[in-house]
Amino acid sequence: MMDKSFLDELRQGVRAVCSDFPDTYWRELDERRAYPEEFVNALTSAGFLGALIPEEYGGSGLGITESSVILEEINRSGGNAGACHAQMYTMGTLLRHGSDQQKQKYLPKIADGSVRLQAFGVTEPNTGTDTTQLKTTAVRKGDKYIVNGQKVFISRTEYSDLMLLLVRTTALDQVKKRTEGLSVLLVDLREVVGNGLTIKPIRTMMNHATTELFIEDMEVPVENLIGEEGRGFSYILDGMNAERILIAAECIGDGRWFIERAVNYANQRVVFKRPIGQNQGIQFPIARSHVNIEAADLMRFRAAELYDAGKKCGAEANMAKLLAADASWEAANVTLQTHGGFGFAEEYDVERKFRETKLYQVAPISTNLILSYVAEHILGLPRSY
Ligand SMILES: Cc1cc2nc3c(=O)[nH]c(=O)nc-3n(C[C@H](O)[C@H](O)[C@H](O)COP(=O)(O)OP(=O)(O)OC[C@H]3O[C@@H](n4cnc5c(N)ncnc54)[C@H](O)[C@@H]3O)c2cc1C
């Protein structure tokens, strides 16, 4: 059961860290497309990025509810949790499917910040959302896997020590189901960059440190296989509900930031001798966005509660992500419109947050694919692809 006063305290703690990183900090990084090193270090030292790591490994052993509040508050403050959110959702794969030896080796270091697990390599240029078709292969040779292939839009690889990588270990024509034969490897980036792995940054419309990976005869020790060979797809799917809930929370944070900015501006900006917010044409869209953010928030907490209770939450987690991403995008549009020409000026930060929140219509899963999931798995309609 959710402890509201603990969540309030947690919010205050995250806000205190974020208050040292004002709009100007994020704006300047955005201009340079630079990674928020100081912010991520501050968040790690305060213990927030180790929220999901059990106490026995040096983390705080909190649930997805609390973790989602941490990410929400970062975006609510005007920052961007995208710089570090993967550390929370990739951790689940290591935590649930890693061996005791792997957990003992990595989790305490991730918790104390001496090692970062910020990268998660799934997407490929030629197969996109059709994950089981991915072409990157790992072939076992003695005590090593030899990995070859290419990945695209893999974020934070330049700022991470470790990466979870999804590869095919058994060819498609040799498995009964296309979801079989995929495996998850924990790649130590410090050992392979320039030695089998080439990282090429991709400049995108927002500051997201995403990259393309070219993998050529990259060696990964067999001891870095997570769980069983061939079962990697189910491990990745397992982590997806957590990812959906955490991203939904970031969108809620964005939405609340937008609504606050829109309300303040609409109250202050005087045109035709009255605040623009006095016009219903201005206030109704803001009010509607607020309603949609609050509704999405209920679904997010419903999904988080089920997740933390160990119950099935695929439907709720997906619906929360869709509702929250749509609501934050609506709020972004409304806020930009409310600001008129000033919405386009960098110094108001609205255009920056507008670009940042748009991502969640597409990644880590696109809105269409969530609708397909709901149609097929919840409503029982025929599979469409
Ligand atoms: C900034 C950024 C950061 C990212 N970070 C990571 C990361 O760290 N790790 C990682 O693995 N990936 C990452 N991604 C990749 C992201 O997860 C993919 O872009 C996303 O899953 C969509 O895949 P795609 O781009 O190949 O689109 P495609 O699969 O080519 O789809 C293109 C469009 O067609 C639609 N579509 C496709 N199939 C169907 C269908 N059957 N029915 C209806 N519509 C369909 C999609 O909804 C989408 O709108 C990132 C992407 C971006 C832009």
Image (cartoon, rainbow, N blue to C red):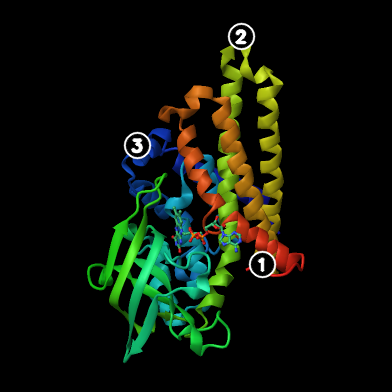
Q: Nearer the viewer, residue 67 or 271?
A: 271
Tell me the distance, in whole angstroms, between the alpha carbons under discs 2 and 3.
Answer: 35 Å
Checking the image for residue 28, the label placed there is 3
Badge 2 is on which residue? 272
Mark 3 or mark 1, which is nearer the start of the sequence? 3
Disc 2 residue type (three-letter): Phe
Say which residue label 1 marks: 384
Q: Secondary structure at mark 2?
A: loop
Where's residue 45, x and y in %? 40, 53
* Rendered view: 131 above or below 256: below
The residue positioned 23% from the left and 72% from the top of the image is 195
Mark 2 vs mark 1: which is more N-terminal? 2
Mark 1 and ligand 1: say if the CB distance to the nearest ligand atom is below 8 Å: yes
Identify the residue at image location x=49%, y=23%.
341
Quarter containing the C terminus? bottom right
Quarter placement of the N terminus: bottom right
Q: Is residue 317 visible?
A: no
